[in-house]
Amino acid sequence: MIKEKIISAYELMADKYNELIDHKPHNAYYDRPNTLQLLPPDVKGKTILDAACGPGKYAEILISKGATVKGFDISPKMIALAIKRNNSKGEFFVHDFSNHFSMVEDNSCDIVLCALALQYIEDWTFTIKEFYRVLKNSGTLVISIEHPFNDYIFFKSNKYFDIEHVKCTWKGFGQPIEVNSFRRSLGECISPLTDNGFYIDKLVEPKPTKEFEQLDPRHYKELNEFPAFLCIRAIKKKENSIE
Ligand SMILES: C[S@@+](CC[C@H](N)C(=O)[O-])C[C@H]1O[C@@H](n2cnc3c(N)ncnc32)[C@H](O)[C@@H]1O
């Protein structure tokens, strides 16, 4: 099954991912700065759910700024690393975001963050509905995803409008690892949000920071010519205002 393959891939790469995450260019100098700028500037005292938190790097940053963070991930190794990285600050759970978030109450979060993970589920609807349920009214959802136009080219698709199972081999986290995911159209990234109680407040096609250039000039040039990721901020509409 595809899900088992995704879990195995992350279990295999978890230690290396954790070791590299602080400075790996695509994460540290491309995804994180662009995604974090979509969060409110002052997260002190805010309750944040980090969905698919990996080894807890985002949680570490947000906890250091005074936020209360709950994180979950489908990979038990990632969750063990997130607990270790955060010295028992924050709460971390092994959980699949295609299932009911039983550890998170309705209307309890100021912010939900989901970085570089939604590509691992075929149908986003249930997960987005859960993000909606756990957010307070006017709460903020911030996601980063693989850019649908980049995926369309990278995976040599000729069925833009389909949601397609795709796979590729990652070589940046130790031994080569096959990673399975789902590519989708831009519309399939936006309508699960706007059909389920959110409006899009801001959309960023990120550019890498200067630190990226020093570490990886070739990809720095490429990412300045064409985006690999897309960062979106969506706001929960008041429950009685959904059409
Ligand atoms: C590219 S990593 C991103 C980790 C973290 N958000 C970050 O940006 O550092 C993707 C994460 O999604 C997790 N993941 C994949 N499928 C998942 C699912 N169905 N439910 C929860 N987490 C999942 C993986 O285990 C992995 O830790």
Image: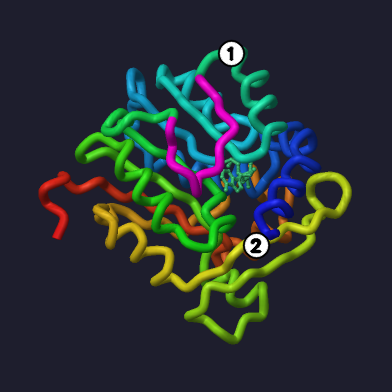
Q: Residue at x 39, y 38 (%)?
A: 112
Q: Amino acid at mark 1?
A: Ser
Residue 208: percent from the left, percent from the top? 57, 52
* Classed neighbour count for the residue bearing mark 2: other residues with Cα under 10 Å, few (<14), some (14–19), many (≥20): some
Q: Among all residues in the image, which is located at the extreme left? A: 240
Relative height, residue 5 to residue 159 (above, below): above
Q: Residue at x 37, y 44 (%)?
A: 130
Relative height, residue 153 to residue 238 (above, below): below
Residue 69: percent from the left, percent from the top? 45, 24
Q: Amino acid at mark 2?
A: Lys
In the picture, the disc for residue 221 is: 2
Label 1, secondary structure: give it: loop
Residue identifier under label 1? 88
Question: Is 107 left or right of 44, judged from the image as shown?
Answer: left
Question: Is 135 left or right of 63, judged from the image as shown?
Answer: left
Question: Is 49 left or right of 121, judged from the image as shown?
Answer: left
